[in-house]
Image (cartoon, rainbow, N blue to C red):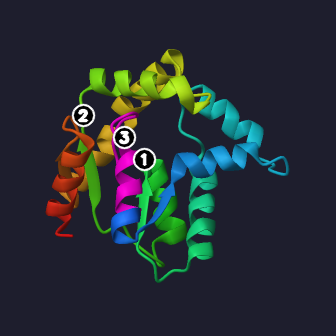
Amino acid sequence: MEIGPGAGKGTQCAKLVQDKGYIHLSAGDLLREERQNPNSQQGELIESYIKEGKIVPSEITVALLKLAMEKNGWSKQFLIDGFPRNFENLEKWNLKMGNITEFQCVLFLDCNEETMIQRILKRSENSGRSDDNIDSLKKRLKTYEESTKLIIEYYQQQGKIIYVNAEQTSLDVSKEIYQKLQL
């Protein structure tokens, strides 16, 4: 699942897990967990990238995703949110995971920037996330515009993009996702 920050990835992924039994792997959550692990050799590096709104090095993210998939068992259906964010992510994924699994489709929750900003600022009231502030958000949106949109265009050319209008209510977004995925 790919979209800009605040468009509803977490909400929609949680519904798909609850209703359809997918295993949800959030690249962002895995990185935040690793960052908070006192035994992590990469925690400080991850923290600095997240605070700056930058994309964490691909090797780290792919390794965390692979480990999570191994723990859950390869026969499961995975819903990976927030990855790949750029072509380097995709190249590292294909290098490490290409012979194991592939992306079947990419859900793109289409949401305008103003809505994303308002949702993130509302979430920041309770989230406790270091990247839920206006400065980090602006950097995340810039990274999204510069890198992630190119990945979306790539998957569109591959015929793997499924567009969903994320400006709707959460329930209506879910209905549209289920309809388009034929669930």
Q: Inspect the image, locate mark 2, and give the three-letter code of the amino acid beneath it.
A: Cys
> Can you tell which mark lies on residue 148?
3
- The quarter of the picture where the C terminus appears is bottom left
Question: What percent of the width, then of the height, locates residue 42?
Answer: 75, 46
* Nearer mark to the viewer, of 3 and 2: 2
Q: Inspect the image, locate mark 3, and give the three-letter code of the amino acid beneath it.
A: Thr
> Can you tell which mark lies on residue 10?
1
Q: Which residue is mark 2?
A: 111
Question: What percent of the width, then of the height, locates residue 73?
Answer: 55, 80
Question: What percent of the width, then of the height, locates residue 114?
Answer: 29, 20
Per the model, the C-alpha gap separating discs 1 and 2 is 14 Å
Taking depth in this image into account, of 146 and 44 the one nearest to the observer is 44
Magenta range: 1-17
**Residue 11 falls inside the magenta stretch:** yes
Taking depth in this image into account, of 91 and 10 the one nearest to the observer is 10
* Nearer mark to the viewer, of 1 and 2: 1
> Can you tell which mark lies on residue 66?
none
Which picture quadrant has residue 20? bottom left
Per the model, the C-alpha gap separating discs 3 and 2 is 14 Å
